[in-house]
Amino acid sequence: MRCDASRSIVHGVASTLMLMMLVTSAAAQSQKFSNVDLCNGKDRTSAEPQITGCTALIQSDADNPKVLMIAYNNRGNAYAGKGQYDLAIQDYNESIKLNPNYAKAFNNRGVAYQRKGEYDRAIEDFDAAIKIDPNYANVFANRAETYQKKGDYPRALKDFDEALRQEPTLAIVWNERCWTRAMIGELQEALADCDKAIQLKPKEAATFDSRGFTYLKLGQWQLAVADFDSALRLDSKLPSALYGRGFAKLKKGDLAGGNADIAAAKTAEPNIEAEFARHGLH
């Protein structure tokens, strides 16, 4: 049902590099700062500038463990952003070797494993990050999402609760808890969570999609259509919103509109109908 690319949480993408070395010339100093900026993700046009900057620092500062630790982590994030998760994991491994207490690298490696579908390995990394830093809200959110993917909704809810206790302004976590509650039938609580997410971040397609899904489970077809309309204004090709809107339209008796939306959703995501059926919407 869910579009992982838009909903999955990627946290800690750019640690600030702290240079601990002296450079011998103005030109070298200028190049050094340029590489630091690139490695910290200053150029967001693509992942390549970050990879280039981090690689230059790794090659030039081989004797500085702190610089290497952060450069490997940041390059791993850039590879993960390209979907090259094996390369990302290799870099996170190097970062963790340099500092076994670097919670951010454990978290980021966990995200890479999660995206590869290796959920148990992801949870091991999130557990390690939490052991190092029990106040790392993003890790609880990521572990919650992993439990969610495994269908372990009680543990997911427990971790979402803890993430929000630590950081109550994380709109994406309110959204994820909304969706999880809708899955287990806590529908009014789910609506309250989605409302909070929209209040915090009113232009997020995924949250309108989640609330629309909740309205589907409540049988409130017109409200579902309105939310899926909002989601599609923000992301016109979101398969779950297209299918959900089509489903609601059919329930309202709009056969032409409903079938058109469902056909478009199936074109974008062939298994979408099975996903909705698995969630109790046949």
Image (cartoon, rainbow, N blue to C red):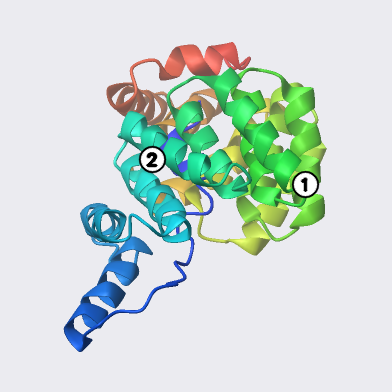
Residue type, numbered disc 1: Pro
Q: Taking 180 as reference, is 254 left or right?
A: left
Q: CA distance from mark 2 to mark 1?
A: 24 Å
Residue type marked 2: Asp
Which structural element holds mark 2? helix
Residues 196 and 259: in front is 196
Image height of 162 relative to 258, above or below? below
Q: Quadrant of the C terminus?
A: top right
10 Å crowding of disc 1: few (<14), some (14-19), many (20+) = some
Circle 1 sits on which residue?
134
Towards the viewer: 231 or 80: 80
Can residue 41 be seen? yes
Which picture quadrant has residue 221? top right
Is 100 drawn above or below residue 40 in the view shown?
A: above
**Does residue 83 appear left or right of residue 142 in this picture?**
left
Which residue corresponds to mark 2?
A: 91
Q: Nearer the viewer, mark 2 or mark 1?
A: 2
Where's residue 103, x and y in %?
A: 62, 46
N-terminal of the two: label 2 or label 1?
2
Residue at 51% across, 60% down: 203
Crowd class of label 2 (few under 14; some 14 to 19; many from 20; radius 10 Å): many
The secondary structure type at the circle numbered 1 is loop
